[in-house]
Image (spheres, helix red, strand yellow):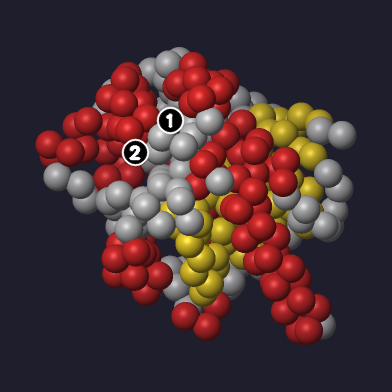
Amino acid sequence: MATSASIPNTDIAFRRDHDGPRALVFVHGFLDDQHVWDPVLADLSAPGFETVQFDQAGFGRRAAATGPVTFDRFAADLNAIVDAIGKPFVLVGHSMAGPVVELVAAARPQCALGLILVAPIPTAGARLPAGVIESFKSVSGFLDIRRQAAPSTPKTEFERIAAAAANTRPDSVRAAADMWNNGHPAGDRPSGFTGPVLILSGTDDPLITAEVVASAIAPRFDPAELTLAEIGQSTHWPHTERPAAVAREIDRFLAGRLAAEAAEL
C-alpha cells in the first residue's frame, strides 16, 4: 500500500509504494509531475525494491515553490529524499532529471546501486540555439512542441500533463529551460558516478538523438558499466508513449544489477 512521507521543515513530500530492502526512485522531467511515471509503474515488477515518486520544486504540487531553479537545488532535494529513505537505491531520471540523478548518485556512491537515464539531457546542457530554446520557455509553447513531437502519447495522459503544467509559474518555466539548456559544470568532465548505468532513448527522439547519446552522454560513463537501449516507436517521452517497454528495460537492468551484486558477495 502506498504511503506518503515528508522532509521536516521543507515542502518536500514523496510517495512510497511496495516493500523491499532497496529503493527505486523516479524523478520526472521538464513540466511534468510525479504521476508521469504511473504507467511505467503499472507494468513494473522490480522485486525487492520499493518505489518512490515526488514532485520537483516548481512542478506538480510544488508549483508554488520558490528559490533557485538550479541542478544543485534539485539535487539537494533528491539527496534529502534518499537520505530519509535510508537504503541502497537506483535512480531513474527523465530528460532534465538526468543531470540531477547523476549528481546525487555521485554524491552517495556507497548507496547508489545504479542510474537509469531516460532520454537524458546532457549534463553539459542541450545547448539549443536561442531561437529554438525560446519555444520551450512557456507552457503553451512547450505543450505545442510535445503534442507534435509525441503524437502517440495517450490523449488522456496528455490532457493530464497539460493540466498539471498549467499551474507552473512562468518564471519557473523560463529558469528551468535555461538550466537544462546551459547545463552543469560537472558535464565538462567524466561522471563522478562509476557504477552501472542504463541509458534509454527513443528511436525517434528529435532532441536526444543517437548521435547526442554517443557524443555527449555515453562517453562520460565507464563503458564497462554502461548499457544502451532504444525504445522503438517513441520520441523524447518513451515512458508515456511506450511505458510497458520502458518497464521491461528497467526490470532487465535491475535483474542484471542484482545478479552482479550477488556475485560480488
Kind of residue indicated by mark 2 = Ala
Q: Residue at x 75, y 32 (%)?
A: 5
| Residue type for callout 1 | Leu
List the residue tagged with mark 2: 149
In the image, taking residue 155 as reference, residue 260 lies left or right, namely right
Q: Nearer the viewer, residue 179 or 161?
A: 161
Q: Position of residue 4 (x, y in %)?
A: 76, 29
Give the x, y percent position of residue 13. Answer: 66, 29
How packed is label 2: few (under 14 Cα within 10 Å), some, or many (20 or more)? some
Examine the rendering and report whether any part of residue 95 can be seen: no
What residue is pinned by disc 1?
31
| Mark 1 Cα-neighbour bin, 10 Å: few <14, some 14–19, many ≥20 | many
Residue at 46 percent across and 43 percent down: it is 237
**Quadrant of res 21:** bottom right
Residue 141 locus on image (x, y percent): 28, 25
Q: Quadrant of the N terminus?
A: top right
Q: Residue visible at 38% across and 18% down?
A: 169
- Would residue 135 appear left or right of 202 to someone viewing this image? left
- Using the rendered image of the protein, determine whether residue 213 is visible from the camera's viewpoint: yes
